[in-house]
Amino acid sequence: MEAQTYTVTQLTQLIRTKIEDGVGTVWVEGEISNLRRQASGITYFTLKDAGAQLSAILFANAAATIGFEPADGLAVRLYGPVTVYAPQGKYQIVVRLMEPAGQGALMARFEALKQKLKAEGLFDRDRRPIPRLPRHIGIVTSPTGAALRDILNILERRFPNLDILIRGARVQGVGAAEEIALGIERLNAVGNPDGQVLPGHAPIEVIIVTRGGGSLEDLWPFNEEVVARAIAASRVPVISAVGHETDTTISDLVADLRCPTPSAAAEQVVGRRRDFEEQVDAHARRLRRQVAHRLDLLRGRLAAARANRVFSEPGHAVEHFRQRLDHLQTRTQGAMDTRCRQAERRCERAADALGRLRVERLPQLRLRLERLLARAHATAETRGHQAQLRLAAASSQLQALNPLAVLSRGYSITRRADGQVVRSVAAAPAGTRLQTRLADGTVNSVVQPLDWPPEGSIPQTHRQTEP
């Protein structure tokens, strides 16, 4: 009997019938990979495990009901019919339901908490600066773990005199998250006089929250909300160093600094001693150069001030204006004498002319002479008044330039014991002896602190000192 021959379509249809009738709708579990989202809203991906893989298709209406975002690496459980897609000759599952499975459920929780805390701004808050060389360090970790040994070895090797407080806590399993959060809270309370955690101890300057590597389940306490909120509420800067470099936890995202490993956290907290010494030397050299440059500028200004006659010979300016005033007085007197002589000559000429005139014109000429005399006297008085005004103005200007006149208006000049003029309160700290020059003498005083004098006493700075 001749064997039946099928076409490709017939054979594929036979296989499809066998699979769809024999398998039907099932639950299947595996890990998502090769996920692709089409513009049409259909999502294609492969569901795989260690021994096989299965194509899967997720339509948009089913995707809207699953409650989380599928992604590569998620372990999920799918529910739907197994079918054969004839044009490509492959079997696939059409996803009706999807839910996290195993580690996939943890990743879904991770993403949900991550989005929640991000919406609250915990990831975008201002980060507290990590001290450059803290002397008091707190560590929250397992007291028997390798992470603690690595951190202590590095800290001891670089700076053996550091003060380290270790707050032991479980770092995996039930209740670990609460112990980690409590450890952060207790280290924040160290040194608080009102607290019960080592009230006489110096406050902690930085906290390291750490553990070694492990699976997602092992690291999960550092993905709990209670730990994230404890880090965010910490008064002390927090460094998160959980797992290996490829591991990222919620505590890493909230902390003030994330380090890939516990050893890296220790290296970040305290740099190499030689590096600090080189930085100090560089700052010292730069400071010396700046101070030397500043001193050169001040020496130049001091030399220029000493060379200026206004400062070296303050009486010279006064003598100059005194000479000018004397010159103005001489000029004024000379001008007045000249005017008077001119008036006298005019009078003499008028008298000579009068003598030559006929007697009948005498009354007329006398009247004219009287008018001329009146005008001469008025002119002389006007000129004299103007000269007096100029003299008064020059005298006022001279008085304004007199250094002692400035003091007579209520101003004073205050110097330190070394003769340096005090131009700012920063130049006269508490305890500085001062000498204040007033118009009629000097006052000696001593600067007292702001919380002085004690109540009921009389401060010495309020007593007037006779010159």
Image (cartoon, rainbow, N blue to C red):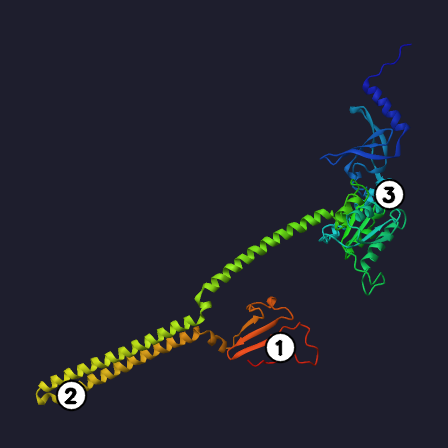
Between 452 and 115, which is closer to the camera in this rendering? Answer: 452
Which residue shows up at 32% across the image and 75% down it? 328
Nearer the observer, 1 or 19: 19
> Which of the marked residues, 3 or 2, is nearer the chain's N terminus?
3
Query: Residue 422, located in which quarter of the rendered image?
Result: bottom right
Circle 3: element type: helix
- Which quadrant of the figure contains the C terminus? bottom right
Quarter residue 87 falls in: top right
Inter-mark Cα distance, 1 to 3: 72 Å
Point out residue 406 in the picture as x, y percentages from the top left corner. Answer: 48, 75
How many neighbours does mark 1 have within 10 angstroms: few (below 14), some (14-19), or many (20 or more)?
some
| Local crowd size for mark 3, using a 10 Å CA cut-off: few (<14), some (14–19), many (≥20) | few
Helix, strand or loop at disc 2? helix
Asked if the residue under mark 2 is in contact with the one under mark 3, i.e. CB atoms within 8 Å, the reply is no
Name which of mark 2 and mark 1 comes first in the sequence. Answer: 2
Please report contact status of discs 2 and 1: CB closer than 8 Å, yes or no.
Answer: no
Q: Residue at x 45, y 63 (%)?
A: 307
The numbered disc on residue 233 is: none
On the rendered structure, is 316 left or right of 93? left
Furthest-top residue in this view: 1
- The spot of residue 277 in percent (x, y) is 70, 49
Specify whether residue 250 is in view. Answer: no
Which part of the image, by quadrant, shows the N terminus?
top right
Nearest to the eye among marks 2 and 1: give it.
1
- Number of the label disc, if any, that sits on residue 366: 2
Residue 446 visible to an observer of this rendering = yes
Q: Is residue 6 above or below residue 292?
A: above
5 over 188 or under it: above or below: above
Residue at numbered disc 3? 217
Element assignment for label 1: helix
Q: CA distance from mark 2 to mark 1?
A: 78 Å
Reading the image, the residue beneath label 1 is 461
